[in-house]
Image (cartoon, helix red, strand yellow):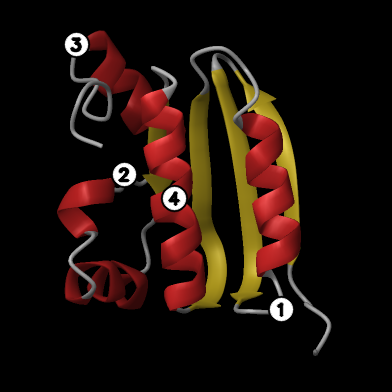
Amino acid sequence: MAEWQGTARIRAVGRWSVLELAGEIDLAAVPEVEELLARLMVQEQPAVVVDLIEVTFFDCTLLGLLSRGRTRVLGAGGSFDVLCIRPWSLKLLRVAGLLEVFRPVASLADLADLDALGGRRHRGARA
């Protein structure tokens, strides 16, 4: 299998645990991304944000991983959000039927605004 050439890191920003991804996310990236995402899910009521802003390519392997991660985080009473701004990636989410599921936002500031307005969209039974 080819080695993944992208980057992934976890950082804490306020109440959020942010998984920042960059580069091309395909089958070669899944083991590392999956391991990092699993680290974020061990917290009680995790507040997970996956940042796709610097991702230049992703395919259905990432979408499946994100879907599984979202289900697990919501099941633990946490929140799961996606940062995504590139038109092609938003189109891919829409074509896959996941745009309304993930409801991506452009920045952590947008999430803070939603919190302030009581708009936590990803909590509850909509898993």
Disc 4 is placed on an element classified as helix
Mark-to-mark CA distance, 3 and 2: 16 Å
Quarter residue 24 falls in: bottom right
Taking depth in this image into account, of 33 and 13 the one nearest to the observer is 33
- Which amino acid type is shown beneath numbered disc 2? Val
Q: Earlier in the sequence, mark 4 or mark 3?
A: 4
The residue at 78%/77% (across/down) is 4
Q: Which residue is mark 3?
A: 118
Pointer 1: what residue? 28
- Of badges 4 and 2, the one in the foreground is 4
Quadrant for the N terminus in the image: bottom right
The amino acid type of the residue labelled 3 equals Gly
The local crowd at label 1, few if under 14, some if 14 to 19, many if 20 or more residues have their Cα within 10 Å, is some
3 or 1: tag closer to the N-terminus: 1
Please tell me which residue lies in front, 89 or 47: 47
Q: How far apart are the alpha carbons under marks 1 and 2?
A: 26 Å
Residue 65 can be seen in this image: yes
